[in-house]
Image: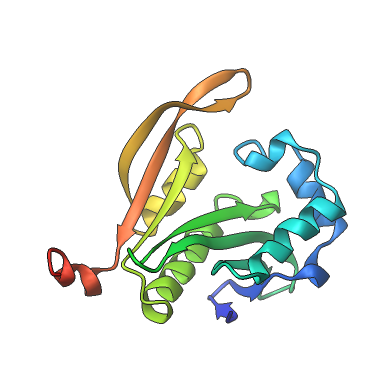
Amino acid sequence: MKTLVGSKFSLIPFKEEHISDTYIGWLNNPEINQFLEVRFVRQTYETVLSYVCSFYGDTEKYMWGIYSNDTNALIGTATLSEINRHHRRGVIGLMIGEKEYWGKGYGTETIKLIVDYAFRILNLHKVTAGAAANNQGSVKAFQKAGFEIEGTLKSHFFYNGAYYDSLIMGRVNKDTSGMLGRR
């Protein structure tokens, strides 16, 4: 796994030594985790370690820490998982934990770096992501990175005592789209 360098930050492979009290705190913070599945289980060093170590097993998947180029501070994490080599696709996940970086383009730039890695280095044809329809920050970040809403899963996401739709978003590698329909 490579370090991916952007204009504002770098995506550094996230490993055991990067787990901090701050990171675990984000995962347990109701404002930060409101759209993450981890919100249902109290996170500890052990649960986080198990999750992080799962990215270094037999399954091809990637996890990066998002580190500010100015301060070297961890501001979030991103993943590329569920890679299917037969269909050449994968799924992107993202969490910006430092609230001062919300709404400033860090999510969009992170997504673009991972898409570039997925298409150029891993030779994937498509990347997808899911987001609760009411998570407008995430939806906008993916759309700014060239993703299109491909579908809606009705009443799929439970949030704050109610069910919300979940959006499925995707982006196709234009360089491999000429292969469509070929056997």
How many numbered callouts?
0
Closer to us: 123 or 21: 123
Q: Residue furthest top?
A: 161
Q: Position of residue 96 (x, y in %)?
A: 63, 54
Residue 65 seen by the camera: no
Residue 56 seen by the camera: yes
Judge from the rendering whether residue 181 lies leftward or rightward of residue 7; answer left or right: left
Q: Position of residue 151 (x, y in %)?
A: 31, 38
Position of residue 62 relative to residue 166, above or below, is below
The image quarter containing residue 104 is: bottom right
Task: Give the quarter of the figure containing the N terminus.
Answer: bottom right
Task: Give the quarter of the figure containing the C terminus.
Answer: bottom left
Position of residue 161 relative to residue 159, above or below, is above
The image quarter containing residue 174 is: bottom left
Q: Position of residue 70 (x, y in %)?
A: 69, 74
Tell me how the rendering is colored. rainbow
Judge from the rendering whether residue 151 lies leftward or rightward of residue 10; answer left or right: left
Judge from the rendering whether residue 45 lies leftward or rightward of residue 13; answer left or right: right
The image quarter containing residue 168 is: top left
The residue drawn where x is 65% and y is 69% is 57
The residue drawn where x is 58% and y is 71% is 8
Q: Position of residue 136 (x, y in %)?
A: 47, 39
Closer to us: 29 or 104: 29
